[in-house]
Amino acid sequence: MSASTRLLTTVSVASVVCRNVHVAIFSQEVKILHMSEVPLKHLFIRNIRKSTFVPEALFSTYLNLLESISSPATHQEFNKTIMEPYLESCYVLNDTSPIHEVPVNIGDDIVLSDGEDTSRSDSMDVDIMKECGGSLDIKCPMSKQDYKALRKWKRFGKEKLAINSNDTFVLRLLSFNILAQNLLETHSYLYKAHDKRALSWESRKSLLFQEILQADANVICLQEVQNDHLGEIVKPFRDLGYAYLYKKRTNDKEDGLLLLYRSDQFNLVDHAKVELYQSGIELLSRDNVGLIAKLSLKDSPDTQIVIATTHLLYNPRRNDVRLGQIQMLFAELERIAFIENTPTGARYHPIILAGDFNLEPYTGVYKFITEGTFEYVGKARNLEPAEYRLFCRLSNMLIPPRLYVTDSCQHYNILKKRLRGEGDGRVMLENSETKELHDESNSTNDPASIYKKSEVDVKTSKCQKIELIDGNYASFSSGRLVHPFKFKNVYQHADRYGNPEATTNQGKWITVDYIFYTEIQPFEKYTLPTVEQCNLFPTIPNFTVGSDHLCLGASFKLQKKKH
Ligand code: KL2
């Protein structure tokens, strides 16, 4: 208890020990130094909160921290390793204003400034750093300043120097799951430990806008954008010159994807609103969606890039569903990004694929995305090897051939048209927004009926391999998927010492959000904190972070095409 002893001697007004609760009361503030009985804490905090001279922020921070520990057994450890250094960081500087700020103003005004607390000098940041051991590997909870210190735009690789802007366009992309308010309310049990005021839409919205607008990205991919919040979310971006595409999740879901791009810099050349829901198919019975935009540079129209975003199924056990969803999304991505066939294979525009994939690094779907191939047959639904329970193993068929999406994540009809020049290249996916197309093909109640003459057997679940043109095959239900993109990650999911990074908290801090890219070079990223550092945050959303996810960001060098 050396920290608290010092506190009590250096700042003296009163110290109260009430049963197992130790409290120090200073001129304007109350610190809770030790509390061994967890049930007591609720009563205690409720009572002390009534006191008008106690800053609310202190309690909310304390409450958040306190609730983030799982059991009374860890309480003492918590006090020692987190609470005491926290209190020390608050007051050891002998400053009259508390470092940990009061909650953001809740109001309609969108704060466009970077939200820096101007009452504090830069030297104070340095002092806090020293208190915390002189590095960012700090052992005290996060203030807004600490959070910002962890979230910097950092250049990497060979590109530390200035970019030559004549033949290069710098594309900065931000991806953020902003937590739809309706989902927050539906899953309110997840947010019991949070300060209720940090969960209000008005408070979160203000923080979300601050962080997003401060990044000054040319393209922004948002997930969980509530349908009836679309107007108010889009408004400030429209005023700043962004155009947008929105795709709501299907059926009864009330949130969706928003892709914003600077309309003074880009033209929208093509786009797809992808519904991963396909009726009558269990694997594709979830309401997740994808959004794909092909953009060209206004000042160099031949320079094009495809940007895609998605938010895949949450259910942590169903990696098989997410694999099927990715297969569908990639088929659409392949269609939009395709340039031409060459003797060495197809060429594609650069692609950036960002979003909330609800899957952890190095798991099955992640491997598929980054390695380009994955064998699912015989695996369990989580795509791990199925050692027992034979009946739970995945068969050779993932999605049925009636969708005409091949095992190489391509639309069969498009492939056929490209290679043989036959047919109309029509996509056989259902889309509630373009229903007329399907009503026409549905007229015989069999979406595949007009393709009866084609070689694909839409009824069988057996493996099919069809020769399109000499040496070129399309396969269905082979037990293995491949895709034609060489996706890399902006983030390495760990710091240079191997400590894992995190993008969200699902009981524990994990990574589920990614920015993948191909045929384009990133040179800068918006750094993510490690799990250890995240554990020092008051659980998010809080008065610093407006969502239950952290946002990702990267800047890319887009090589302009010469005429
Ligand atoms: O983890 V998320 O939160 O990527 O931020 O995506 C989903 C989950 C989102 C859309 O379905 O809602 C959240 N328990 C916890 N969170 C859930 C659950 C659940 N059972 N279902 C959906 N979500």
Image (tube, rainbow, N blue to C red):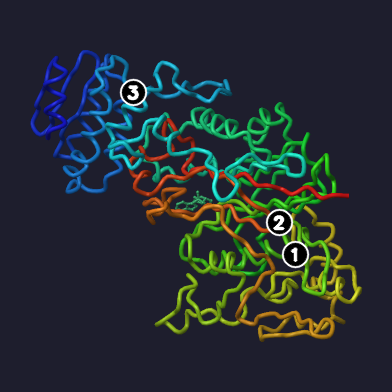
Residue at screen point 48% across, 22% down: 106
Q: Quadrant of residue 516?
A: bottom right
Q: Quadrant of residue 443?
A: bottom right
Q: Note whether 435 is above or below 30 in the view shown.
A: below
Q: Is residue 494 left or right of residue 526?
A: left
492 left or right of 26 in image: right
Residue type marked 1: Leu
Q: Within 8 Å of ligand 1, the CB of disc 1?
A: no
Q: Position of residue 189 (x, y in %)?
A: 39, 45
* Residue 541 image offset from top left, x and y in percent: 44, 37
Q: Going from the N terminus, do you reach mark 1 or mark 2 first?
A: 2
| Mark 1 surroundings within 10 Å by alpha-carbon count, few (fewer than 14), some (14 through 19), many (20 or more) | many
Q: What element carries label 2?
A: strand
Say if mark 2 contacts mark 3, CB within 8 Å: no
Residue bearing the label numbered 3: 99
- For badge 3, the amino acid type reads Ile
Judge by depth and name the residue closer to the eye, 536 or 439. 536
Q: Earlier in the sequence, mark 2 or mark 3?
A: 3
Q: Can you give x and y, in whole percent of width and height, for residue 93 in the image?
A: 26, 21
Q: Which of marks 1 and 3 is nearer the N terminus?
A: 3
Crowding at dot 3, Cα within 10 Å, few <14 / some 14-19 / many 20+, comes out as many
**How far apart are the two marked residues, 1 and 2, measured between alpha carbons?**
9 Å
Q: Quadrant of residue 401?
A: bottom right
Secondary structure at badge 1 equals loop
- The residue to which callout 2 is attached is 274
Q: In this rendering, which labeled residue sits more in front, label 1 or label 3? A: 3
Q: Which residue: 45% across, 46% down?
A: 187
Q: How many marks?
A: 3
**Residue 26, which numbered label?**
none
Q: Which mark is residue 429?
A: 1
- Left or right relative to 342: residue 66: left
- Check whether the beta carbons of the residues at disc 1 and disc 3 lie within 8 A of each other: no
